[in-house]
Image (spheres, rainbow, N blue to C red):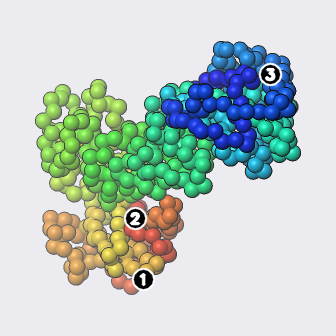
Amino acid sequence: MEHPTVTTYSAKQNAVPGEQNPDLRREGGAFRRPPGHGFSASRKQLQHRARLEHQVAGSANQRPFGAPLAVSQMHNSRSPDCEEAPKDTDRLCIPKIQNKFSENLKDKAIPRGDIVVTLECLDFKWDLRLPQLFQSETLTKLYLLAQGGAAPSRGLDMVIRPLSPRKSKERRFIKKMTISLKVNDPMVTEAAFATALKNLYLSQMDVDLDDVLEVLAAAHTLQFSRLLKGCVAMMISALTPSNVTDFYLAGCKYKEELLVTACERWLEVNLVPEVGKQIHLRKIPKDLLQKVLMSPRLFTFSEFHLLKTLLLWVYLQLNYRIQAVPEYETMLTFFKSLPKKSCFLDQEDEHGLMPLFRCLRLHGIIKGKDLDALRRIDFFPESWLLQVTAHHYHSAESGGDMIHVRNFATEAVRVGLLFSQEYATYSKIITVYGFFFEMKGIKNDSTSYSFYMQRIRHKDVGVPSSACEHRLVSMRAERMVRYEIRAQVLVDSQWQEFRTSEVLQKFRFAGRSCKSQVLKVQTVGIPIYVSFSFTFPVS
């Protein structure tokens, strides 16, 4: 954030009476006394005011130790250097000063009706009370600069001394001060800045979700920590496909790590089931997308679903005017129609997309028709598809052994279940190299769930005929499987995770050996995102 500009006025300005409340008029968002409106004062009061002016002017004309010369001379008409002035105030313990001021002002040394500081910003003027002003670190620094850039050793006492409650009876007048803040962030609008200032006076945050991005920017400019935390919490609890990218970019810009992490975490679970079906997928930056694809917590229904999501993202980048999600066949036709001398990913302009597609586990796409479609669009290098085909051939010939899989964490085949509120039981049947497995979830009661996988026969009740048509059927009595079951659920903006360990188990057709370990989940959250990761090691 660019350092703010400070404008200060000499102590010979008009003073605001500490006990009277003259009529005020509004001027550019601030209150001003009408011309010609004055007030009478006794001789004793005038003498006291003269002494106060002399003391303040005298301290302002002396350069405090460590303070820039331009800051200490408050009577000088030019503003202090905006690059140098804040550096000295940074040496002060701003939170300590804020707390000390708050304690003093709680004693009502300054009447609540009096205006102490006028803030000029965004072509508006706002009159602020000190208890509220000191909640903003930026405004606190500006106030200290206006007091003369007090040095750390004596600045706290020097600034607080005039506000001491013990002298409140003697002091009849309060110096009026104007500070100026220059804002260069285009995200900070007048309405958002006004909302941020309003929240200085509120114990509970009052911000509309539609305005939260701009208010976050204003809170960052003001360094208003309570409002910053409130905006971040609101954004985290309201993540959707339409706003997750904007919230993520704002978190990066203002270095709100909690918000950045929450957006990444939300996308890890919702990229395929939610964002991958909407036009908002287009807005996700490439770097963020790659980070999500590499996460071990990434949820997908299958490797093929993840591939379709990534192809859609590329399609939307190339067709920025399209405002509707196309059918899968439409995408394939588009990529097939592109003029190219080599495959899409090998072209010079698209070579940068290669790291994204290297995150895919193409060997997890088993259906021959899906692989044939990828060959026809000439999207992947031919060597990739030949390698995947060779892996499938050798695995089928060796009884299902996935010899090519060396790293379970990054190469295991993934299958996902999205267990929703209405389900009492939910299952999915898959077939890999002639072996049939059922991934199943059961709702035990309102907060208890069980998830497991089991081996089944191709002739069992419930196995659809389409699962067996033109497929291999293995008659092997045993199949060694390495697997892991993971469940994720969102509760009160916090992700709960449940998982089994990485298990190596021999699956048979009957008895206990046909069923995996059961992942038991106790949660009040819904839906539950369940991922089954598995490989067939050499047996």
Disc 2 marks which residue?
Answer: 529
Judged from the image, the secondary structure of the residue bearing numbered disc 3 is helix
Task: Give the vertical position of 447 relative to 304 (above or below).
Answer: below
| Residue at 51% over, 40% down | 194
From the viewer's side, name the closer residue of 247 and 117. 117
Q: Is residue 413 visible?
A: no
Q: Amino acid at mark 1?
A: Asn
Residue at the spot x=50%, y=64% of the render?
492
User: Does 517 sit above or below residue 235?
Assistant: below
Residue 381 percent across, percent down from the top left: 26, 37
Q: CA distance from mark 3 to mark 1?
A: 77 Å
Residue 70 or residue 431, whichever sits in front: 70
Name the residue type under label 3: Ala
Q: Residue 38 lies in what quarter of the image?
A: top right
Tag shown at residue 57 = 3
Compared with 166, 203 (above or below) is below
Would you say 36 lies left or right of 141 here? left
Instruction: Measure the alpha-carbon separation of dots 3 and 2.
Output: 67 Å
Q: Earlier in the sequence, mark 3 or mark 1?
A: 3
For mark 1, give the secondary structure: strand
Quadrant placement of the C terminus:
bottom left
Residue at 38% in and 79% down: 442
Disc 3 vs disc 2: Cβ atoms closer than 8 Å? no
Count of numbered labels shown in the rendering: 3
For residue 199, side relative to residue 326 (left or right)? right
Residue 35: give x, y in percent of width and height: 58, 27
**Residue annotated with mark 1:** 444
Marks 1/2 in contact by CB < 8 Å: the verdict is no
